[in-house]
Amino acid sequence: MLEFLKKIYFPNIKGLKGPLGCLNSARYGIAWGVIGAAMDCYDSALRYSKERIQFGKPIGGFQLTQKKLAEMITEITKAQMLTWRLGVLKNEHRATPAQISMAKRNNVHMALTIAREARQIHGGMGITGEYPIMRHMMNLESVITYEGTHDIHLLITGMDVTGFNAFS
């Protein structure tokens, strides 16, 4: 059965090149997808910070909230730039599996951090179904483990940097 599937899905590919190519494409897609989740969490936190009044003014007027929002948008922008550049390399057939792993690992971590900060800005409302934060957090917690765990991607990057294979 495996040979039959290989002939259908990977007719001109020998070894693991085909399946690993699919894995790299999936990881690249995740790197982009989690940016969308982070952007939704950020957008929700920004809107909430302008609407939620505390001590007579919107919480967006407080330094700590502004710091959180500024850091969130900075991290989202960095992830967008990383993944855009990776896309350029991918289109030129120059993106390496290690670069793709780095982007997947970085962006999932970034999105989880932003979801957690957005939940803090929302206060108690951050855990309700009225806002998208917890839905994104649950999805991101699952994304951090599939197509290679956070730690596996760290080892892939480490092997790329040092030249030593820590898997064996």
Image (cartoon, rainbow, N blue to C red):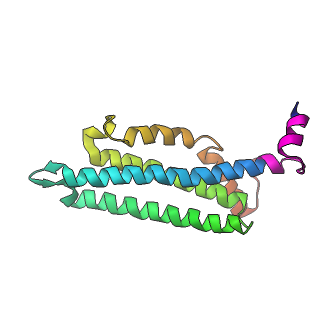
158 to 136, vertically: above or below:
below
Q: Residue at x 88, y 30 (%)?
A: 1
Span colored in magenta: 3-19
- Observer-nearest residue: 165 or 54? 54
Count of marks, rendered view: 0
Q: Residue 82's image quarter?
A: bottom right
In the image, residue 2 above or below residue 76: above
Q: Position of residue 131 (x, y in %)?
A: 33, 41
Tell me what residue is drawn at x 90 percent, y 51 percent. Answer: 12
Counting from the top left corner in percent of width and height, residue 168 is at 79, 46
Left or right of 73? Residue 108 is: right
Q: Position of residue 55 (x, y in %)?
A: 10, 51
59 drawn magenta: no
Image-quadrant location for residue 63: bottom left
Q: Pick out the residue farthest to the left.
A: 56
Does the stretch in magenta take in 15?
yes
Left or right position of 8 against 81: right
Occupied quadrant, residue 3: top right
Q: Is residue 33 visible?
A: yes
| Residue 166 appears in the picture as rendered | no
Which x, y percent locates residue 21?
76, 52
Q: Residue at x 26, y 56 (%)?
A: 65
